[in-house]
């Protein structure tokens, strides 16, 4: 559900973007470029920062992120060995919060993933909702069509629930924002291998949560993910179902041809 907005506006002064990454050398560059565009789109309305948490990487994820920073992306890169997305998000969040001068209640934490492309208005839209009183903003995801293919894109759309009033029941760490004081009061990201986004939101039951279809990001359609049992696992199940349906259609077609002959 979408909680009602309070009458008193909230002064957000800083937006901090947290991006966990594990062996994402093929995608991290594009993700950083998109985040940079979203930060520039803010104009002078707030200050912003971004950290890439290179967690247990065996590839060039950290190096590529640092190169992107030197070429105008202005991101911090932290290398950790957590080997788990929940602690990685927490370490990145703690890193940025320690360096901020803005109060927690005036700080907005925008979370996404290294295999995700955010739109230019991603932060502007969250900022508007935060300033209107939202304490948590949960957006939705779409699949990268060039990677998913038309059949998987269609299946995903068929099974991905969106409500007629512009709300939805989903929670994605790739598209989740919340106010700093609300985050700390809930205890922050938990030490879980997957479902860290659901775990955190469950501890935010008293917060003013806005679940909106108006804020969407494009995520990869890979079927083998970094977190066991995560989003990629659902996509793999959809792919297997599609393959089974196509195999059934092929067999049925062959039987019909045989009968006619």
Image: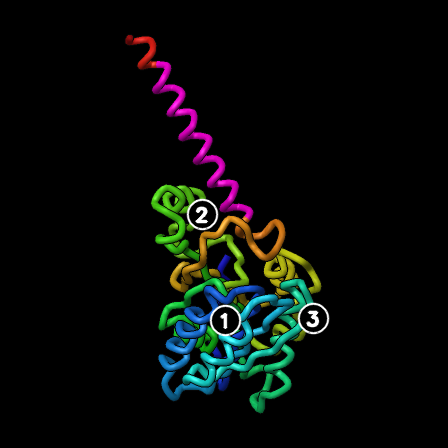
**Most foreground residue, 151 or 23:** 23
On whether residue 142 falls in the magenta region, the answer is: no
Label 1 Cα crowd, 10 Å radius (few <14 / some 14-19 / many 20+): many
The percent coordinates of residue 61 (x first, y second) are 53, 70
- The residue identified by callout 3 is 187
* Among numbered discs 3 and 1, the one appearing first in the sequence: 1
The percent coordinates of residue 83 (x first, y second) are 67, 64
Q: Tell me which residue sits at (64%, 67%) in the image.
A: 56
Mark 2: which secondary structure? loop
Q: Tell me which residue sits at (49%, 75%) in the image.
A: 64
Residue 144 as seen in the image, left or right of residue 96: left
Among the 4 quarters of the image, the one containing residue 30 = bottom left
- The residue identified by callout 1 is 134
| Magenta stretch secondary structure, dominant | helix
Image: magenta residue range: 233-255
Q: CA distance from mark 2 to mark 3?
A: 29 Å
- The residue identified by callout 2 is 161
The percent coordinates of residue 35 (x first, y second) are 43, 74
The answer to whether mark 3 and mark 1 are in CB contact below 8 A is no
């Amino acid at each position: 559900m979408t909680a009602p907005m309070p009458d008193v506006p909230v002064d957000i002064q800083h937006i901090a973007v947290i991006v966990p990454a594990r062996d994402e050398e093929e995608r991290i560059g594009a993700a950083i470029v998109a985040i940079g565009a979203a930060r520039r789109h803010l104009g002078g309305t707030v200050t912003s920062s971004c950290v890439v948490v290179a967690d247990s990487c065996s590839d060039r994820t950290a190096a590529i992120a640092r190169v992107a920073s030197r070429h105008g992306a202005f991101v911090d890169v932290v290398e950790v060995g957590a080997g788990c997305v929940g602690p990685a998000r927490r370490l990145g969040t703690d890193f940025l919060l320690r360096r901020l001068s803005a109060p927690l209640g005036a700080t907005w934490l925008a979370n996404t993933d290294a295999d995700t492309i955010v739109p230019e208005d991603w932060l502007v839209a969250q900022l508007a909702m935060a300033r209107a009183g939202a304490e948590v903003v949960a957006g939705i995801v779409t699949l990268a069509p060039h990677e998913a293919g038309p059949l998987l894109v269609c299946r995903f759309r068929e099974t991905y629930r969106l409500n007629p009033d512009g709300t939805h029941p989903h929670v994605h760490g790739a598209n989740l924002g919340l106010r700093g004081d609300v985050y700390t009061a809930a205890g922050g990201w938990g030490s879980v291998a997957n479902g860290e986004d659901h775990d955190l939101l469950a501890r935010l039951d008293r917060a003013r949560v806005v679940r909106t279809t108006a804020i969407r990001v494009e995520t990869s359609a890979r079927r083998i993910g970094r977190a066991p049992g995560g989003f990629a696992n659902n996509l793999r199940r959809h792919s297997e179902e599609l393959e089974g349906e196509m195999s059934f259609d092929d067999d049925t077609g062959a039987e019909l041809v045989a009968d006619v002959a």
